[in-house]
Amino acid sequence: MNESNDFKMQVVKTVLGLSIMLIMQFILKKVIPDMYYLRYAVTGITITFLCPFMFHM
């Protein structure tokens, strides 16, 4: 893979990861609006464990 394609893939992964995070925050805000700590903890755990697993596939 050349350098241009590698850069494009990194941009796609970054945009996808940020999109997942924002969508998750939006959904959790609607489901549990008063539990800020739980919402951010769930988002952090997802970003820490789920996103790297998805991007290595």
Image: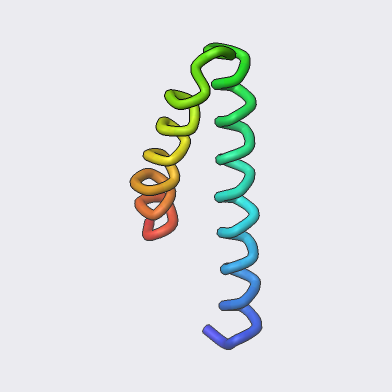
Q: Residue at x 57, y 68 (%)?
A: 10
- Total labels: the figure holds 0
Give 39 or 51, whichever is nearer the viewer: 39
- Dividing the picture into quadrants, the one containing residue 20 is top right
Residue 17, given in percent of the width and then of the height, sits at: 55, 50
Residue at x 58% of width, y 14% of height: 33
Q: Residue furthest bottom?
A: 2
| Residue 41 to residue 19: above or below | above
- The C terminus lies in quadrant: bottom left
State how the image is colored: rainbow
**Taking 48 as reference, is 39 left or right?**
right
Tell me where residue 23 sits by quadrant. Answer: top right
Where is residue 51 drawn, in percent x and y? 43, 48
43 to 39, vertically: above or below: below
In terms of depth relative to the viewer, which is nearer, 33 or 3?
A: 33
Asked whether, in this view, residue 7 is left or right of residue 43, the answer is: right
In-image side of 56 versus 9 (left or right): left
Q: Residue at x 44, y 56 (%)?
A: 55
The residue nearer to you, when weighing 33 against 13, is 33
User: Is residue 39 placed above or below 33 in the rendered structure?
Assistant: below
The answer to whether 21 is drawn above or below residue 25 in the figure is below
At which x and y percent is residue 2? 57, 87
Percent x, y for residue 43?
A: 47, 35
From the viewer's perspective, is 16 left or right of 47?
Answer: right
